[in-house]
Amino acid sequence: MSSKRTRFATARARPAVDALRARPACEVLIIGGGINGLATFRDLALHGVDVVLIDRGDLAAETSAASSRMVHGGLRYLEHGEFRLVREAVAERNDLLATAPHYVRPLATTIPLRTTWTGVAGAPLRFLTGHGPAHRRARGAVLVEMGLRLYDSYSRAGRAADGTGVPRHRYAGRAQTFDELPDLHPDTTSTATYFDAGVRAPERLGLELALDAVAAHPRARVATYVEAVGVDGGGVEVSDVLTGERIVLTPQLVVNASGPWTDLTNAALGDATEFMGGTKGSHIVVDNPALLAATRGREIFFENDDGRIVLVYPQHGRVILGTTDVPADPREPARCTDQEVDYFIELAAHVFPEIPVTPEQIVYRYAGIRPLPRSSGEDPGAIPRDYRLESGVLPGTQVPLVSIVGGKWTTFRALGEQVADAVLSRLGRVRVVSTRGVAIGGGAGFPVDDARDDWAASRLPGTSRERAGVLLDRYGTRAVGVAAAEREKGSPWERMLGAAPGSGLRDAADYSRGEIAWIARNELVERLADVVLRRTTLAFEGRVTEPMLEDLAEVVGEARGWSRAHRREEVEAVRSELLDAHGVELGRRREWLPALGRR
């Protein structure tokens, strides 16, 4: 967790903080609400542990929200000999396809190839030592084929308990390649297509882990915008980021799940460590219909002659271009720079040269820091992606401190299980249930394609077939609650706005007012940015406008009991965050205060 703090002038009701103040004791305190902390939280709650999770921001708001949105085994890790991690990751990918089918779906990934033998000479050296030739060249068809055959073997062996997996890779010669992907660079001689998975809503999947935990055990608690700032007596002092209030929590054990900020959190607790050495990964999201069509729904994974890699990945009607892998300082905000933007645009032209990508097409940019272990290696791409646990004690106490070092998005369930096992052992308990195969959130009972209409007809009465499909894709089977909110009559929103809950937001008619109100009431929302950036895809798609923010502030503010001044602060905070962190500048500020004051 970083030490950055935020203060607001308006009074803020904080029930989650009130609950901490009323009962500061717990068995386990998890610091960090990224995907790994959330997985650990869910696992422990399923075991009946009195567990508290805090984060200085929103859930899954930093590294977990800044991924390439892939659920993958890590094909490139084979070259560095990380076989255990790849074997585990493909098994976890298959498990997620089965347990979170509303968010995780198979993704065809195509590698354009221009040579046959390049890279083969350096591969044994890289495999044996972790370091290859100083001047990398693109992998040729032979090396790619060798890697994919091994990858397929792990994938088949790691099928989910219900048999869920992905197809084997396939190779296409030049003629077939251009028949399938006619816009590729003319120097392409062949392609290899393999299957991993994509996650269409990583932040929402993280949220649902938290909701599952709270539903599983009444003593499991979540408090966002709460930061660990020190040790006081035998407990951990935490600060409400929004109000400045401080509370001392008294856990029996602490798990530091702060990701790239693990060392900073330990330092705040008085324990100097040097575990982490993360790298920054940046992405841009472009609105380019020609590029979107050119991908044919696939991710394109291209390696340039100098070893530089670009991902071209369609999602939500936009195209993601990424990613970088450069050393990063967790004390500084991770930002996608103009130089990185130029890099992405340049490399995109190496993949689809006849489809220009311009800065004007960028609707969103984002960056995050990978929680990698400290390494003396010069090549960031060669830093191990595996994870480990480090044990210590809170200074001046007998409270055990477990720090998570490393970890990739795909393996969050397995990592959470390993951490939970370590915690349960220290608490004198044993594992009684596994999270493997356990559906996540709206993935429970999710209907397969040919059953969707029947499911919607029986569980979403009065909802059109088209709308039911939208809600299923956004919320899985939790769509039942959203649809009920959209049918609500005589609601505060209807009286206040003169509009039915099922009516859409301005400039985003596919998001209804009832839907947003349901999110605000049921999805651990504390800030307007939580809704704009993470509970919806509005920011990612580049659709946020001033009128839309007015409507969102109205509906969320009504649901959360915000005053007019509070709503103003929240809108200004969203505008500032969009500009600073994501390169999104909304139109000239409008005089919207009277709209917020309507009653």
Image (cartoon, rainbow, N blue to C red):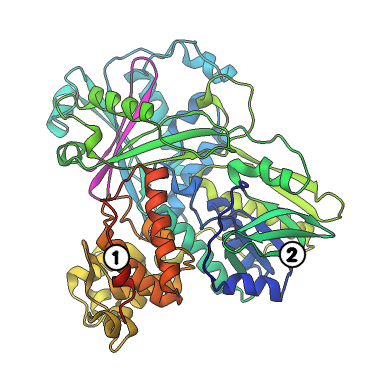
Percent across and percent down for residue 114 are 26, 17
Residue at horizontal 50 percent and vertical 45 percent from the top: 63
* Main SS of residues in magenta: strand
Q: Position of residue 157 (x, y in %)?
A: 47, 43
Q: Name the residue under label 1.
A: 592
Compare residues 322 and 7 and report the one nearer the observer.
7
Task: Say if 450 sits above or below 578 in the image.
Answer: below
x, y percent for residue 276: 64, 35
Q: Is residue 71 visible?
A: no
The residue positioned 26% from the left and 28% from the top of the image is 348
- The kind of residue on which mark 2 rests is Leu
Residue occupying the far bottom of the picture: 490
Residue 489: name its quadrant: bottom left
Residue at (18% x, 24% y) in the render: 353
Range of magenta residues: 297-319
State the image coordinates of residue 488 (x, y, percent, origin top left). Answer: 30, 85
Numbered circle sitting on residue 249: 2
Mark 1 or 2, nearer chain start: 2
Q: Which amino acid does label 1 sit on?
A: Trp
Q: How crowded is mark 2: few (under 14 residues within 10 Å), some or many (20 or more)?
A: many
Which residue shows up at 46% across the image and 43% down it?
90
Query: Looking at the image, how many numbered discs can be counted on the residues?
Result: 2
